[in-house]
Image: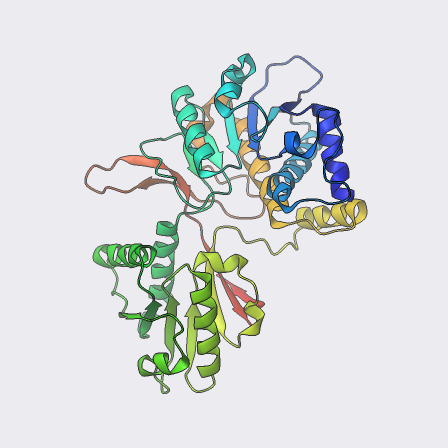
C-alpha cells in the first residue's frame, strides 16, 4: 500500500495529464519535459477512485519507479539551490504525444527525457529533430530505426555497441584463447554474427579466433564437448539473445566445467536473467548501467525507501535519479547550448556515461544519433559479483 500512496500523491497533487515543478520566483529558467507511462487514467476512475483495491498491477511499475527517481533528483537539485521548470507527462493519458507537444507550454522546452516504447520514442525523436531539442531515452535498448537525428540520445546501448564492446573485451583479455560462439539458427543470431564480423574486418589488433557452432534445440553437454579442450581455457560466447537457449547453455557448460576450464560470455540481456546463481561458472556480461550502491547517494536513496516505504528501490529508481540529475545539471550549466555539450562527462552520478556520435555508414560518415558507448563488464560466479571491468 505504500506504493499506492505515491500514486495518490501524483494524482491529487498534479492531475492526470501533466504536472509541473516550477520555482516560486519568475526568473527565466530552462525547462525539461519528461514523458512516462504512469497509467493514471487507467489506475483511477472519473471520480479519482483507485480501480485496483489493495492490488498494485505490475504494469504500473516501470514508469512509476523511474518517476520516483526523478522526484528524488528534483529534491536534490533544490537542496543545491538549482532549479529547472519540469513538466511531466503521462504517455498513457487521454492526450496523445502529438497533442501534448502542440501545447503552448511545450514551446519553452529545452530538454526531453522519455521512458518510452519504440513507437513513442520514434515520435518524440521526430519532434525533437523538428524543434531542435535534445531527447534522451534512458530505457529502450535499440535505435528504433531512428537515423540522421543529432538530437536523439540513447543511454541504453544498442546491441551493435555491446557486440563491439564484447569483441574488444575478449581481444584484450582472451586474445590467445579459443573463442567458441555457440548459437542457434535465426535472424537475430545472424545479426550478432554480422556485428562480430564487422569489427573483425576493421580491427587494427590481432583478430579473435572465433569458431561458430550451430546447436539444435534441446542440445546436451555431449554436443558441446567436441569443441572444448581439457588442457587449456576456452571462452564460450552465447551467440543468441534467447533466454531458453542461454539457460540450457549455462546448464550444460556448468556440468562440464569441472573437466573443461572455461569462461562464459553472455549477452547484455543476462543482466536481468534469473537463476544465474545456479551455475558453477564464471559468467561475464556487458551492461551500460552498473551501480554497486555503496556510494553516499545510493545509500541515501536506499535508506529513504526503507524508512518511508519499507522496501528497496528498484534499478529503475536509480535510473530515473541518474538520468534527471546528470542531464538536468548539464541543462542548468549550458542552457540552450546543451545540444553542443551533451557528451560532457563532468556530472557523473552512478555510472560513467560516454555519449558518442553513432555512425553506421563509414563511407558517408553520417551522424545517425548519439549513444552511450560506456559498457561495464560484470563477472559473476554462482550468481555473486566477483569483479567489474
x and y percentages locating residue 337 in the rendered image: 45, 24
Q: In this view, does 20 lie above or below 207?
A: above
Q: Is residue 206 above or below residue 352?
A: below
x and y percentages locating residue 100 in the rendered image: 53, 20
Determine whether, in the image, residue 3 is placed left or right of residue 386. right
Task: Tell me what residue is drawn at x 64 percent, y 39 percent.
Answer: 64
The colouring scheme, among rainbow, by chain, secondary structure or one colour, is rainbow
Residue 332 shows in this picture: no
Q: Which of 246 and 163 is in front in this view?
A: 246
Q: Is residue 359 above or below residue 213?
A: above
Task: Tell me what residue is drawn at x 56 percent, y 63 percent.
Answer: 274
Residue 53 shows in this picture: yes
Task: Tell me what residue is drawn at x 76 percent, y 45 percent.
Answer: 304
Residue projecting furthest to the right: 307
Determine whether, in the image, residue 258 is placed left or right of residue 181. right
Q: Nearer the viewer, residue 349 or 223?
A: 223
Task: Tell me what residue is drawn at x 43 percent, y 87 percent.
Answer: 259
Where does the N terminus fall, quadrant-wise? top right
Q: Is residue 210 above or below residue 197?
A: below
Q: Nearer the viewer, residue 195 or 300?
A: 195
Determine whether, in the image, residue 93 is placed left or right of residue 75. left
Q: Nearer the viewer, residue 61 or 357?
A: 61
Amino acid at each position: 500500500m505504500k506504493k499506492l500512496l505515491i500514486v495518490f500523491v501524483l494524482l491529487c497533487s498534479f492531475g492526470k495529464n501533466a504536472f509541473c515543478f516550477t520555482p516560486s520566483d519568475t526568473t527565466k529558467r530552462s525547462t525539461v519535459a519528461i514523458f512516462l507511462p504512469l497509467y493514471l487514467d487507467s489506475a483511477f476512475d472519473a471520480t479519482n477512485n483507485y480501480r485496483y483495491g489493495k492490488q498494485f498491477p505490475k504494469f504500473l511499475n516501470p514508469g512509476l519507479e523511474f518517476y520516483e527517481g526523478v522526484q528524488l533528483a528534483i529534491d536534490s537539485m533544490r537542496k543545491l539551490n538549482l532549479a529547472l521548470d519540469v513538466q511531466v507527462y503521462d504517455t498513457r493519458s487521454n492526450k496523445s504525444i502529438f497533442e501534448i507537444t502542440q501545447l503552448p507550454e511545450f514551446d519553452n522546452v529545452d530538454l526531453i527525457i522519455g521512458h518510452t516504447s519504440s513507437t513513442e520514442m520514434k515520435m518524440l525523436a521526430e519532434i525533437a529533430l523538428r524543434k531542435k531539442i535534445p531527447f534522451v531515452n534512458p530505457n529502450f535498448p535499440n535505435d528504433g530505426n531512428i537515423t540522421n537525428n543529432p538530437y536523439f540520445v540513447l543511454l541504453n546501448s544498442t546491441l551493435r555497441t555491446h557486440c563491439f564492446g564484447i569483441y574488444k573485451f575478449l581481444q584484450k583479455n582472451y586474445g590467445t584463447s579459443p573463442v567458441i560462439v555457440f548459437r542457434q539458427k535465426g535472424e537475430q543470431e545472424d545479426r550478432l554474427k554480422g556485428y562480430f564480423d564487422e569489427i573483425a574486418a576493421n580491427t587494427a589488433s590481432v583478430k579473435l579466433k572465433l569458431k561458430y557452432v550451430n546447436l539444435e534445440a534441446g542440445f546436451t553437454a555431449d554436443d558441446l564437448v567436441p569443441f572444448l579442450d581439457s588442457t587449456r581455457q576456452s571462452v564460450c560466447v552465447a551467440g543468441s539473445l534467447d533466454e531458453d537457449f542461454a539457460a540450457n547453455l549455462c546448464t550444460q557448460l556448468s556440468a562440464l566445467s569441472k573437466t573443461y576450464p572455461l569462461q562464459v560470455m553472455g549477452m547484455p540481456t543476462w543482466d536481468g536473467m534469473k537463476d544465474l546463481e545456479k551455475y558453477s561458472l564464471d559468467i561475464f556480461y556487458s551492461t551500460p548501467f552498473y551501480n554497486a550502491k555503496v556510494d553516499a547517494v545510493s545509500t541515501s536513496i536506499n535508506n529513504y525507501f526503507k524508512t518511508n516505504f519499507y522496501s528497496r528501490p528498484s534499478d529503475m529508481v536509480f535510473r530515473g535519479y541518474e538520468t534527471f540529475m546528470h542531464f538536468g545539471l548539464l541543462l542548468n550549466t549550458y542552457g540552450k547550448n546543451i545540444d553542443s555539450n551533451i557528451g560532457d562527462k563532468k556530472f557523473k552520478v552512478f555510472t560513467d556515461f560516454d555519449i558518442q556520435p553513432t555512425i553506421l555508414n563509414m563511407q558517408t560518415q553520417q551522424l545517425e544519433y548519439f549513444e552511450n558507448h560506456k559498457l561495464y563488464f560484470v563477472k559473476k560466479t554462482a550468481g555473486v559479483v566477483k569483479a567489474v571491468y
